[in-house]
Image (cartoon, rainbow, N blue to C red):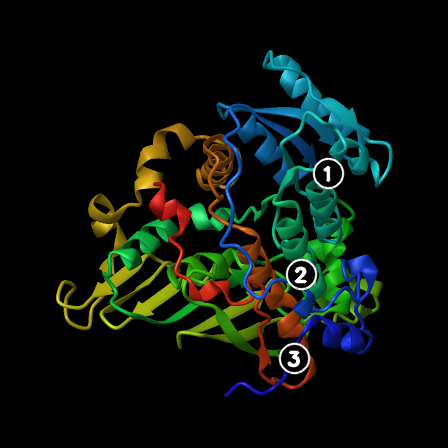
Amino acid sequence: MANSNNINRRDFFRKSSALGLTAALGGSILAGKSRAALPSIPPAGFNSKPIDLVRIGFIGAGGMGSNHIRNLMNIEGCEIRAICDIVPEKVARVQKWHRDANKPVPAGYSKGEHDYKRMCAREDLDLVYIATPWRWHVPMCVEAMNAGKHAAVEVPAAVTLDECWQLVETSEKTKRHCSMMENCNYDRVEMMVLNMVKQNLFGELLHAKCGYLHDLRDQAFSKGGEGLWRPAHNLTRNGDLYPTHGLAPVAQCMDINRGNNFDYIVSVASKSRAVNDLAARRFGPDSPHTRTNWKLGDVVTSTIRTKNGETIVVTHDVTTPRPYSRDYFVQGTRGLVRKYPEARVHIEGTSPAHGWEPLSKYFDKYDHPVWKAMQQKASGAAGHGSMDYIEDYRLVQAYRKGITPDMDVYDAAALSAVSQLSERSIENKGESVNFPDFTRGMWRKPRELQVQKDA
């Protein structure tokens, strides 16, 4: 049963120093105004005027950013007007891609860490895309929205609860959308399961499992890419640092922020050994790598209970040798489905008694309409198969149509909050911690998920 350990913003500010959060990891803690100073129930989303040509400023032309850029260059109705990166060579590379494709060359911004502010101030931008290290996500989103632009940001959208509130408050104040770019929402199996859930194939939902299980140990020894910044989080934080890839598709199935909400979370973490074990074998027992004291437990397990009574087990494991998995599993009163290690389904009255069936058997009937419509167009696109392209396409089309994007700022906040809440629970030996209600009651009003309504 949940205890009274509900974290409001003022309480979070008071207690944060004891948790060892630092601004260097994106943990800028602002006292801000109290929740009472805001409307008790914010407007249920908002639409903007249709934009015939969506003009984009892009920040961060690294690995994931480059994938988005290549996709956007091939999506009708948008144009990259500006590119910002602290590495001038990356800016020049993107400009060359545009020249080679006979497209207008975006203006370049690479005069230090804060040159993104100069780019956001441009009057010829509608949307700012952000694919940078986590500590920059919220400052860049806030800058963009305050400058009158919509924001789209890589995962997680925020690191701390205060940052989640900053995104929500700024979006409400400016009437600009802030979308978290969760590509796994658009993977074929996850979209198909969502479609099956909405057609009541599994009955009333009861339980789900999900997570991010990905061997990233080499980042601890890398001096490039995410190795430049991501291991710093593992050194100083113990929690589910990357919850959204698995949890976001489950949240859509369970109508989070659309008639349901996360209620509370309980988290525990194993000891940390796997990276040190690899370092000892690779560099020797006396190596600095071997002696590094990692705070992040090798396996972090969280259980979330929703307001409607479902449970979700979320696993974070990025430091053990293992095949990649998002541990995707959804269960209801009439059946269940899993994705890993093989996609299997059991539907009461249809599947063999006590037996699994290949999920592929149901593709013809339940493949999501968005996936079916876009499969050919997205084939061969940049990124993680077709889902990255569909993700980028859906966002651009939302602004072209003047409708709310598939994932709004409340989704970004609720999903990103898992990191800070799990840290808090682990710090207190698995005590339950309540989720803040970023919607301030709006979640009780059913809202159709846009990707289902506008498929």
Disc 2 vs disc 1: Cβ atoms closer than 8 Å? no
Q: Earlier in the sequence, mark 2 or mark 1?
A: 1
- 398 or 130, nearer to the observer: 398
The amino acid type of the residue labelled 1 equals Ala
Q: Which residue is mark 1?
A: 147
Q: Mark 3 Cα within 10 Å, few/some/many (few <14, many 20+)?
A: many
Question: Which of the 4 image quadrants contains residue 451?
Answer: top left
Label 3 vs label 2, nearer the camera: 2
Q: Which image quadrant: the C terminus?
A: top left
Q: Earlier in the sequence, mark 3 or mark 1?
A: 1
Residue, far top? 102
The amino acid type of the residue labelled 3 equals Ile
- Whole-number angstrom distance, CA of label 3 to CA of label 1: 38 Å
**Residue 80 in the image: above or below residue 16:** above
Give the SS element for disc 1.
Answer: loop
User: At which x and y percent is residue 447?
Assistant: 40, 56
The answer to whether one can see residue 188 in this image is no
- 171 or 304, nearer to the observer: 171
User: At which x and y percent is residue 317?
Assistant: 58, 66
At 50% from the left and 88% from the top, the residue drawn is: 1
Give the SS element for disc 3.
Answer: helix
User: At which x and y percent is residue 214?
Assistant: 56, 58
Q: Which residue is mark 2?
A: 165
Q: Which residue is mark 3?
A: 426
- Whole-number angstrom distance, CA of label 2 to CA of label 1: 18 Å
**Residue 421 in the image: above or below residue 361:** below
Question: Which of the 4 image quadrants contains residue 108?
Answer: top right
Residue 408 horizontal side relative to residue 364, left or right:
right
